[in-house]
Amino acid sequence: MAFPHRPDAPELPDFSMLKRLARDQLIYLLEQLPGKKDLFIEADLMSPLDRIANVSILKQHEVDKLYKVEKKPALSSSEQLCFLVRPRIKNMRYIASLVNADKVAGRTRKYKVIFSPQKFYACEMVLEEEGVYGDVSCDEWAFSLLPLDVDLLSMELPEFFRDYFLEGDQRWINTLAQALHLLSTLYGPFPNCYGIGRCAKMSYELWKRLEEEEDGETKGRRPEIGHIFLLDRDMDFVTALCSQVVYEGLVDDTFRIKCGNVDFGPEVTSSDKSLKVLLNAEDKVFNEIRNEHFSNVFGFLSQKARNLQAQYDRRRGMDIKQMKNFVSQELKGLKQEHRLLSLHIGACESIMKKKTKQDFQELIKTEHALLEGFNIRESTNYIEEHIDRQVSPIESLRLMCLLSITENGLIPKDYRSLKTQYLQSYGPEHLLTFSNLRRAGLLTEQAPGDTLTAVESKVSKLVTDKAAGKITDAFSSLAKRSNFRAISKKLNLIPRVDGEYDLKVPRDMAYVFSGAYVPLSCRIIEQVLERRGWQGLDEVVRLLNCSELAFTDMTKDDKASSESLRLILVVFLGGCTFSEISALRFLGREKGYRFIFLTTAVTNSARLMEAMSEVKA
């Protein structure tokens, strides 16, 4: 059922060191304000902070009261205020208004602003503009790597995606390079580096510059991780836009996993209370079903329930001594397992209810048709009906984007018709969202008569072949063409299956999408690792509009053990989905690798669309 790791799988590095480092640095910063102080925390930082330093640790270091940074005025009576915030302009205005209110009231207090993961010049400028720069002291808490699980690190920067891939804002690239630098200081050096995408290339170059500045820190050390792979999210939007069907992905799509935790409501807990549950490898029940296709999960859970019952029933024929042993050694574990089992069964039932109501089968059928390029007319009609029935603004957008990317842009007639229907159905305030989607290349309109080729042919007559190739690339990147069909053929993303695809015994990574599609991002990683570089993938790289942006850097390192060469760190810039994580875990089991994931944030189709939307939910 659940695939165990191969006995020869390499050991994972211990990432708890990252937590300790972050905690020690935060405590050091808090102690720079000796005595009692009140701490104001930005909402986004509350969950990550809780995973690093809980309330009792903060209290030990003289944090008196905790407040949330929000619009209403703070009623703190403390003489020292400490703010733990992301470097955002609105936070600076909030802090300035507090300081200025104190000035008006004639109060003098001490103020300290701790920026996480780094401070930006713009923030200090705002404090200066508001006339409070001299009143506050500013510090950085360089906390940018949160271990969510044994093999998953997250920067918890969901805004990275919108800032970089929509606004073209490069400010987080430094944060990312610093995070990679920290990883290579602790677990490096990384002998083999591969990457694709503009953001990947810039982050890599900046990281290498940081390494050169502190030359020699990792020299002579044995590498723990043999390969690192950097991948931009815009290399593969399709995978992120598909509905997830592995258990962990479905839980994320249905209940939203935030920072490794999920809130299960009364419909799951079958009580009147909600429950916050930490989902990671320590939850033994969850760990066995997380990467499974949803169709297998019920069977597994009911089998588990029967086994559990059998273990409980053993106590019937016990004498007093055996009973004492059973109670002291086994009962607690069984009760814990029972609690987790009933939670996951409740979650499955809740997911089933919601999906039946939404007619999930029909939706999946449409998505598969789009991926394979069949019945495009029917799929377009399905999307129109979805919009007209006002199922959900985010879902309708997602389907339109999937249609656009798989078809290399919508024909003008369809683009106009779908856009008009959408705005009439969900409201004209969504107009700006369409402009964002177009800029990011997610929802585009095909040029009438494909004018690109005409222009290209004129230009290519004037210049040599090699330059013409570059110009063609420049044009295609201007048009942000997705070329999904061609890439799909080249990389064989749609598996040919004779008969039924057996989801109980998956044969390839396509199982994460019911056997219909191998995630493009995962296929690229698989191919590059197999070839130890990009050779032989030139056509794919060109179709991805990345001719200048795919790189390989391999150092001849005799110190790298065969074990470390089977450990691969995959860095997703702009977010990765649980489906991709499951697919690569599967690939690792097949090939004897272990993958470690670093992502700017865990994402899914809804988060992707919300990041592009100008209408805040």
Image (spheres, grey):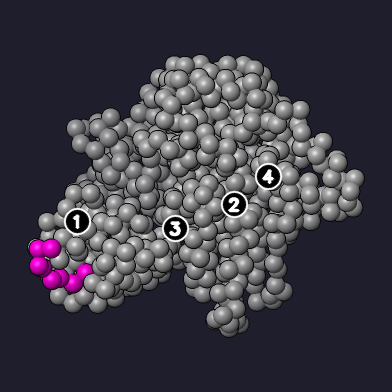
Q: Residue at x 61, y 28 (%)?
A: 403
Evaluate whether residue 335 shows in this view: yes
Mark 3–mark 2 CB contact (< 8 Å): no
Q: Which mark is residue 478?
A: 4
Q: Residue at x 63, y 56 (%)?
A: 198
Q: Residue 155 carries which label?
A: 3
Is 110 contained in the magenta span? yes
How packed mark 2 is, by other alpha carbons closer than 10 Å (few <14, some 14-19, many 20 or more), is many
Q: Quadrant of the C terminus?
A: top left
Upstream in sequence: badge 3 or badge 2: 3
User: Would you name the residue on which mark 1 appears?
Assistant: 67
Horizontal and vertical percent for residue 579? 53, 41
Q: Is mark 4 on a helix, strand or loop?
A: helix
Res 25 quadrant in image: bottom left
Q: Residue at x 9, y 63 (%)?
A: 105
Mark 3–mark 1 CB contact (< 8 Å): no
Q: Is mark 1 on a helix, strand or loop?
A: strand
270 and 92: which is toward the camera: 92
Residue 266, above or below 556: above
Horizontal and vertical percent for residue 304? 39, 37
How many callouts does the rendering have? 4
User: Would you name the residue on which mark 2 appears?
Assistant: 232
How packed mark 1 is, by other alpha carbons closer than 10 Å (few <14, some 14-19, many 20 or more), is some
Residue 513, above or below 216: above
Upstream in sequence: badge 4 or badge 3: 3
* Amino acid of disc 3: Met
Q: Is mark 2 on a helix, strand or loop?
A: strand
- The region drawn magenta spans 104-115
* Amino acid of disc 1: Tyr
